[in-house]
Amino acid sequence: MSVAARVVVSAAGGLVVLATLSSVVRTLVIPRGFTSRLTQAVEKTVHGVYHAIVGRVPTYESKDRILATEAPAILLGLLATWLGLLVVGFGLLLRGAADLPIGGAMREAASSLFTLGFATTDTGAATVIDVVAAAVGLVIVALQIAYLPTLYAAFNRREVLVTTLESRAGVPAWGPELLSRHALVNSIDNLPTLYTQWEAWAADVAESHTNYPILVSFRSPKALRSWVVALLAVLDSAALYLALCPSTAPSSTRLSLRMGFTCMRDIATALDLEYDPDPLPDAPLQLTYDEYLAGIARMRMQNFPMERTPAEAWPHFRGWRVNYESIAYALADRTAAVPGQWTGDRSRMDGTPIAVMPPPNRTPENPDGAGRAPEPGEFGRR
């Protein structure tokens, strides 16, 4: 091979190595939400394969079991892609620097990158490339291993409040259910604390999920839980509270609501999802007025106190929900979240929401907790 050809091959190998290392650094090292086209390509490819598969699966529970492995598959796919490109890059460097045949160059690059040492070339340039390849391979594997505790720590923080919401808002979580259950057990005075906790939760999730977007693909441990649906339920409950009870709703309600849709917008930006950053208060909703009335009816069953009539509160509720509805629905569809009430349609599901059922109110006088069963469609279709 001519000198000019060897220079071109070495330059190509160097560019492949540098581009791969840039992707590694931007993904694993810099905590600023930076990413690379290579990382995005791997994530989109794995995401597309998984969602093509779950589109053929009939039940939601089966879809959830399959999608639970999507995030680990992305991590493994990234590691395999980085190592594969580095083998190619260092192989091209060895091909140009030591004038090795392409097969032998790739074999030696793989031997050095994985520190196996079964193939070496006794020249100065090749030795330097082998040493650098071995160091790079070790560093990348170490960075990937060190990356996991950060991800799982953020995942665990996220899921704690999502889990506690099960007793407060049912499963799948639903905004009107959250308010009605607090009225049922006379614990409305606990709502200010709940909204304060969710304000902090939203800030934490906004920071972690924009810095490490792969966290979006990590699913909750149980099929009927979802961090997207849980956040949407809290935001809907806050919007209902402010719309129906403007003088008694605590200040933490408004703060939680604003931080919640700010969190969704930050994550949407990191995922390149389109949204209106400043929607008008009277912009149309996908949620229908009849669905809104069904939620109000659920709250009335437990005598949740209301200052405004549903008709009076509707423009105020709509004015809040336009800030986050489209983003929440897009995130729910992207993550194939559990199809709860007021969570929009899913492109790979049949569109029938799973209704949260009211818990039995057991008392000494009524040990079975018997009460009026919801009419079909009253709280959403099952």
Image: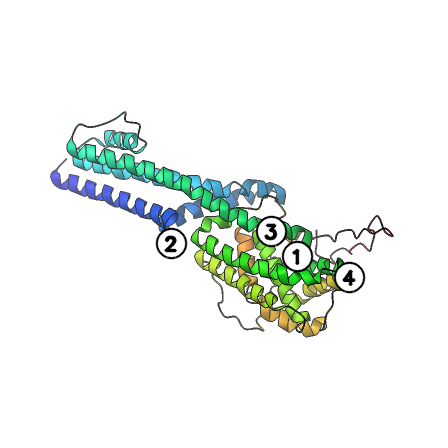
Question: Is residue 309 toward the left or the right of residue 104 in the image?
Answer: right
Observer-side mark, 3 or 2, equals 3
Q: Which residue is mark 2?
A: 34
Observer-side mark, 4 or 3, equals 3
Query: What count of labels does the image hold?
Result: 4
Nearest the camera: 50 or 136? 136
The reply to whether dot 1 and dot 4 touch (C-beta < 8 Å) is: no
Amino acid, disc 1: Trp
Where residue 162 is drawn, which disc sits there?
3
Task: For label 3, count other residues whose C-alpha is less than 10 Å away and answer few (under 14), some (14-19) or many (20+).
Answer: many
Instruction: Compute the Cα span from label 1 to label 4.
Output: 15 Å
Q: Position of residue 304 (x, y in %)?
A: 74, 65
Where residue 174 is drawn, which disc sits there?
1
Q: Position of residue 5 (x, y in %)?
A: 16, 40
Q: Earlier in the sequence, mark 1 or mark 4?
A: 1
Residue at image coords 62%, 60%: 193
Task: For label 4, count other residues whose C-alpha is less than 10 Å away and answer few (under 14), some (14-19) or many (20+).
Answer: few
- Residue that lies at the very extreme toward the right in this rendered image: 365
Q: Which residue is mark 4?
A: 301
Amino acid, disc 4: Met
Residue at image coords 31%, 45%: 21
